[in-house]
Each structure stands twice: as C-alpha cells, then as structure tokens.
Image (cartoon, rainbow, N blue to C red):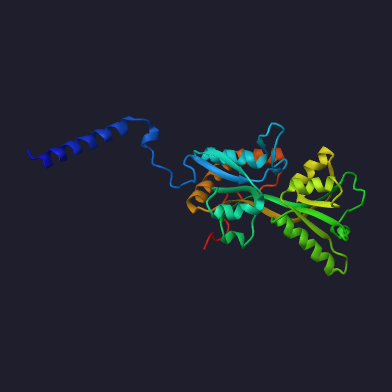
C-alpha cells in the first residue's frame, strides 16, 4: 500500500470517528454557531450613559441598575451572551458604534430618520420630554411658554438638546424672549447645575423627571412634550435581526410587559418588534 493510500484511509477513519464523537457528544457541540458576530466573542457589549434613574443609573454600590439595564441583560441572555457595559457620554456613542467599540447602544437613543440611515434601530419604548425646576417650582413655570427668558440645562448631543432648542425657536416665533440653552456632558451635570441654581430648569425624559420629583429633589413643571420612540441601535444587521427575535420572545413570555409595567414606562405600539428604517447605506 502506498503512503498516499494509507494516509487517505487514516483521514477517512479519523473523520468518521470525529463524526461519531459529535453525535454522541453534548448538544452544545452539535449546535451550529450563531449567525452573528460580536466585538468580543461570547459577550454583548453595550454603551450606556447611566445618569437617568430609574431607567439607567448607578446605585450606592457602584452597580448598574434600571429598566434599560434589566432589558439589556435579558436580551443578552436570550442571545446566549454575557452582558458587558461601557459607560460613556452620549455624544461618543454613535461614532463608537460605527468604529466597532461596542455592539449596541443601550441608552434609549431616540429614533430619527437620519439616525436610521447610520445604524439598525429597534424601537422598544415610548418617551416624552419634561422640564424639571427647583423643588416647589418657585418660578411658577407651568407651560413651555413660561420658560421664556430662563436658562435651561441639557445633555449635549441628544434629542433632548434638539427639543430644548426647538422650544427656544417656538418662543421666538411667538415674539417672546427665548431661552438660554446650556449644554453639559451628561444629565447628572445638568441636574447638578439646576440644584446649584446655575440654570433655571433642566430637560429630561418623563420617567426620569417623575423619579426626581418623587424623591423630592426637583419638581416636574412640564411633561409630555414631543413624544418620541426610544430604540436599541446596532451596526451589524445579523446581530440586530437576532435581537429582534430575542425581544419578540421576551414579549411572548410576558417579560417585556411585566418589566415596563413595573417601571411605569410606556410600551411601543404593536404586538412585535422590528427594525425601523433602512439601516446603513
């Protein structure tokens, strides 16, 4: 027998033995690999700006907490991945996603047509804008017109800043004095400026504003403005598709509804999740 023939027989026998081992082995070994890739194998890396209690914040022990954190953890588990969070300012999140520094933005990024052309966005939450003022509302602010002439603090780069500037434009179009918009690196800094009297009001989302009011830190003077849709955002289409399937499973199992009811957050319209918009072009 030639060496080549012997080698072929050896390889055939080895392949057959390997096939038997796979069949007889654990189910995990027999399963096909996931149809998506993540930046770090085995992990779902998410960017988050934990300055918006009760949705995303850091507790006294330095642990990430909140509705969006819980949903992110449940999503990672459904995907068979370990959740990992990168705490970073919002302004860096979209460039970081494009640069593949994280797999997903989990900070309640609002849907816009422009953003939907840069990433794959999955709506999962309804939110609106509030304006917080100092506790007791000493300035008597009750409507957006009452913000005329005052300074308002807001996080840099988000839809909240856009909407705050929109209120300024609305005031000017009515012939009223506008507002002075002061931007900060994150919401925590904006809220601290309000607490210190450096601004007269601060922009927030409804759920966070209610949280601070219930704590007694501030008064939610205005709420329900500019209803928006919050999303998860991905750079990879295959991972986004897998996330859609996972979210739909969480909804079918009742987890999604229970979580949102527990936090008093508005759910999306419709019975299922889907990518909205065209995605990167």
Residue 21 left/right relative to 226:
left
Q: Which residue does the image show at 80% across and 61% down from the upper left?
A: 167
Q: Which residue does the image show at 88% across and 66% down from the upper left?
A: 176
Nearer to me, 139 or 23: 139
**Residue 68 image-quadrant placement:** top right
Q: Position of residue 225 (x, y in %)?
A: 77, 56
Q: Position of residue 198 (x, y in %)?
A: 85, 50
Q: Which residue does the image show at 46% across and 41% down from the upper left?
A: 41
Residue 115 left/right relative to 31:
right
* Residue, far left: 1
Q: Position of residue 242 (x, y in %)?
A: 50, 47
Q: Position of residue 210 (x, y in %)?
A: 79, 44
Quadrant showing the N terminus: top left
Count all numbered tags in the image, as a single digit: 0
Q: Is residue 150 above or below residue 216?
A: below
**Residue 56 image-quadrant placement:** top right
Nearer to me, 53 or 58: 58
Q: Which residue does the image show at 63% across and 38% down from the upper left?
A: 70
Residue 263 left/right relative to 217:
left
Residue 31 left/right relative to 226:
left
**Residue 195 image-quadrant placement:** top right
Nearer to me, 244 or 40: 40
Q: Is residue 99 visible?
A: yes
Q: Is residue 26 above or below residue 81?
A: above
Q: Is residue 268 visible?
A: no
């Amino acid at each position: 027998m030639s060496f080549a023939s012997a080698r072929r027989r050896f390889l055939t026998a080895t392949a057959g033995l390997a096939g038997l081992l796979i069949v007889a082995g654990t189910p995990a070994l027999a399963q096909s690999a996931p149809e998506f890739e993540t930046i770090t194998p085995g992990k779902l890396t998410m960017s988050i700006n934990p300055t918006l209690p009760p949705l995303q914040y850091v507790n006294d022990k330095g642990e990430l907490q909140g509705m969006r954190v819980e949903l992110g953890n449940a999503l990672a588990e459904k995907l068979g991945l370990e959740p990992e969070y990168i705490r970073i300012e919002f302004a860096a999140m979209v460039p970081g996603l494009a640069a593949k520094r994280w797999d997903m933005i989990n900070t309640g990024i609002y849907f816009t047509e422009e953003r939907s052309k840069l990433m794959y966005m999955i709506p999962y939450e309804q939110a609106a804008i509030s304006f917080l003022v100092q506790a007791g509302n000493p300035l008597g602010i009750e409507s957006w017109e009452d913000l005329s002439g005052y300074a308002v603090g807001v996080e840099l780069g988000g839809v909240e800043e856009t909407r705050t500037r929109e209120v300024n434009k609305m005031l000017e179009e009515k012939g009223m004095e506008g507002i002075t918009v002061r931007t900060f690196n994150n919401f925590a800094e904006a809220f601290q400026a309000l607490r210190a009297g450096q601004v007269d009001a601060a922009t927030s989302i409804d759920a966070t504003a209610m949280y601070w009011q219930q704590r007694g830190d501030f008064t939610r003077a205005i709420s329900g403005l500019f209803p928006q849709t919050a999303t998860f955002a991905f750079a990879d289409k295959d991972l986004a598709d897998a996330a859609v399937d996972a979210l739909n499973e969480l909804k079918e199992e009742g987890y999604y509804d229970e979580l949102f009811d527990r936090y008093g957050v508005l759910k999306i319209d419709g019975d299922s999740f889907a990518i909205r918009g065209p995605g990167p072009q």
